[in-house]
Amino acid sequence: MSFKELSITHSAVLPEVMVIKPSVYSDLRGNIYTSFNRELYRGLLPDGIDFIHDKFAESRFNVLRGLHGDTKTWKLVSCVFGELYEVVADVRRGSPTFGKWDAFLLRGDDYIQILIPPGYVNGYYVKSDKAVFHYKLAYTGDYVDASDQMTIFWNDPDLAIEWPCSAPILQERDMKPKN
């Protein structure tokens, strides 16, 4: 088995957001793929920015996490188990795509990754009984923790996101967002 190039496309709504599909090797045992290769992914980030750490979030059906973001962190997100409805929205004032959003169906068996630039918020809704969300973070300086991140209400009327739910399970942070 040899490592092949990544398949990269861009969101039709948010052209700076990349949709990445790594090559997958399949045989009678199942599948194997490379979720990260430093040299290949480094070329997707600005010079001097590297991925620093990873996080995983396990959630149950009907949980909605987000919308969260900041102005310096690049996020490479994917679903490693289950099924998620991932939303990315541009909240950069003055941007030609300000206030626009795009949605992606991420499943543990499709290996799709979304690369989200700084200045965007993202969130996801769990469609399966359980799901595991993975995000790899790249930034300079200190990590921007939850208390310093932007939080936009999941059903903000200005964004008018079409979520596949009407009454999701939310954490307190997402019930009272701060901008």
Image (tube, rainbow, N blue to C red):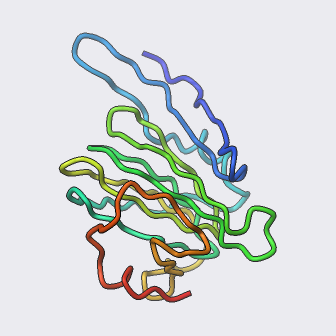
* Residue 94 image position (x, y, % from top left): 81, 74
Q: Determine the residue positioned at 30% across, 12% down.
A: 27
* Residue 57 image position (x, y, % from top left): 29, 61
92 vs 33, left or right, is right
Q: Compared with residue 31, is residue 105 higher up or lower down, i.e. above or below? A: below
15 vs 33, left or right, is right
Q: Determine the residue positioned at 45% across, 63% down.
A: 123
Q: Nearer the viewer, residue 99 or 82?
A: 99
Q: In which quarter of the image is the N terminus?
A: top left
Q: Quadrant of the C terminus?
A: bottom right
Q: Determine the residue positioned at 49% across, 25% down.
A: 23
Q: In the picture, residue 164 is in which quadrant?
A: bottom left
Q: Determine the residue positioned at 36% across, 62% down.
A: 55
Q: Nearer the viewer, residue 80 or 49?
A: 80
Report the number of discs: 0
Q: Compared with residue 69, is residue 36 higher up or lower down, i.e. above or below? A: above
Q: Compared with residue 35, is residue 85 higher up or lower down, i.e. above or below? A: below
Residue that extends furthest to the top in the rendered view of this protein: 28
Q: In the picture, residue 157 is in which quadrant?
A: bottom right
* Residue 88 image position (x, y, % from top left): 55, 59
47 vs 118, left or right, is right
Q: Compared with residue 173, is residue 9 higher up or lower down, i.e. above or below? A: above
Q: In the picture, residue 70 is in which quadrant?
A: bottom right
* Residue 84 image position (x, y, % from top left): 36, 49
